[in-house]
Image (cartoon, rainbow, N blue to C red):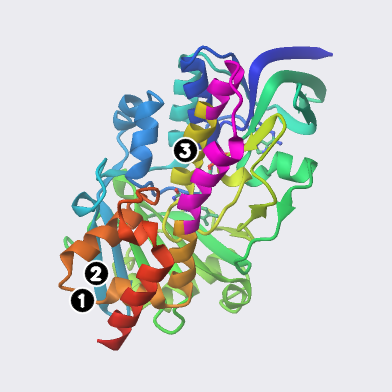
Amino acid sequence: MKEVVSDVVVIGAGPAGAVASALLVQKGWSVNVVERQEFPRFSIGESLLPQCMEFIERAGMLDAVKAAGFQFKNGAAFEWDGARTAFDFTEKFSPGHGTTFQVQRAAFDKILADEAQRQGANIYYRHGIRAAEIDGEGARLVAECDGEEVIFRGRFVLDASGFGRVLPRLLELDRPSAFPARESVFTHVQDNIADEKFDRDKILITVNPEQRDIWYWLIPFSGGRASLGVVGERSKIAAMGEAPEQILRNAVAAAPELAKTLRNAEFDTAVQRISGYASDVSTLVGPGFALLGNAGEFLDPVFSSGVTIAMKSAHLASDCLHRQLGGETVDWQADFAAPLKHGVDVFKTYVTAWYDGRFQDVIFHRTGQTEIKRMICSILAGYAWDRNNPYVAAAERRLNTLAEICAAS
Ligand code: FAD
């Protein structure tokens, strides 16, 4: 039986795994990445946030991402029953990158993985992890490739397996999410949007005119293509039709402004559905392992925070791991789990308030308060860890006060 040994074993070569492995090889550690699929492969999660550009840059991957010709992105536009508003991320409160990209994930994830490999990480594609023995002394993971078993040994495991949730399942760490089970139905289209006022540099979030907890994304790509999806509670999505394409077409027809924007769109790609994606775990760390990105907690797609959180977790974990492998005693709760969770909880506050309407009242309110708008803009740009922003430091209290003011006026 084949056996390979490295300092660190990373499960999954998505954004979290690629960034973490690049950062670790940069610091001199040997890293084997075990990836179930062959790249390029489809993944959902196509609208990035400016905050993640900092993590891409630190991982030494920014030039490659910039050179790929992805659609430039500088903000988010919102539409609800004729009301429109937009946030320009370059006007945000927090320092840092103010623009980013909207990416076909098959190409984007391959670039990140290739960059990690170029820097020295060994990626084993078509190797699916199916068993794990891990303790404070080290790890032994069993992978399968073309019917053969391969053993991966390492001093530490980073689980970046996304919705595969390898260690949460094998170590029984899964915990139900506090969010209800929602479903998303989505595809790629040739959008044929001729309206010159349509801003391809922004993701468009449309709220269903009748049901405010149903919303749509329209993420323009370069080359005249776009990602289109609808999100809602399972029962509400099921009420829209049976076959995925019928559901998506009916959903768009129920949002007249979006339907107008997409009147010439060609549905030329299979429509997919994914449900029950919100997830949580009892712990993000244990002896010999840490959970990154979606393998830990996943909230909701509405503010496009998934890739940013995945990369933030990769950064925090690789810093901790570098210190630990170098002989330091590391408090993973204090230096990894707690700081990561702080930003995730900020996003959670705004996601909760999006679905109960409070944050929608804020977003669609015509405010003259530009400073407050800049602070809200920072959160939408992914700067959920900037405690200098009062809407981060005291998210729930500040948001409630603002929502009350907006609802009253
Ligand atoms: P992934 O990107 O899922 O990568 C995990 C990798 O692990 C995969 O390549 C997989 O093949 C591999 N793997 C799985 N199991 C195994 C195994 N047993 N052995 C070996 N390898 C394995 N995020 C955004 O930032 N912007 C968006 O616009 C956005 N939209 C979304 C829309 C929807 C409907 C949903 C559900 C999510 C959306 N997200 C979005 C979230 C985004 O998809 C994820 O947060 C992001 O992909 C997480 O990255 P990751 O590296 O943790 O995992």
Give left or right: position of 142 versus 358: right
Give left or right: position of 224 versus 116: left
Sort mark 2 into few (<14), some (14-19) or many (20+) by Cα contacts within 10 Å.
some
Three-letter residue code for mark 1:
Arg
Q: CA distance from mark 3 to mark 1?
A: 33 Å
**Which residue carries the number 3 mark?**
311
Q: Quadrant of the N terminus?
A: top right
Element at label 1: loop
Q: Which mark is residue 366?
A: 1
Res. 282 in view? yes
Up the image or down, 7 lies above or below 332; here it is above
Sort mark 3 into few (<14), some (14-19) or many (20+) by Cα contacts within 10 Å.
many
Decide whether the magenta segment is chiefly helix, strand or loop.
helix
Three-letter residue code for mark 2:
Thr
Sort mark 1 into few (<14), some (14-19) or many (20+) by Cα contacts within 10 Å.
few
**Which residue carries the number 2 mark?**
85
At x 52%, y 59%, the residue is 300
**Which residues make up the magenta segment?**
320-345
Residue 213 position within the rendered picture, expressed as x and y whole percent measured from the top left: 48, 75
Q: CA distance from mark 2 to mark 1?
A: 8 Å
Circles 2, 1 touching at the beta carbon (< 8 Å) = yes
Q: Which mark is residue 244?
A: none
At x 24%, y 69%, the residue is 85
Element at label 2: strand
Up the image or down, 299 lies above or below 103; here it is below
In magenta stretch: residue 323: yes
The one nearer the camera, 406 or 47, is 406
At x 29%, y 28%, the residue is 67
**Mark 3 or mark 1: which comes first in sequence?**
3
Give left or right: position of 195 versus 126: left
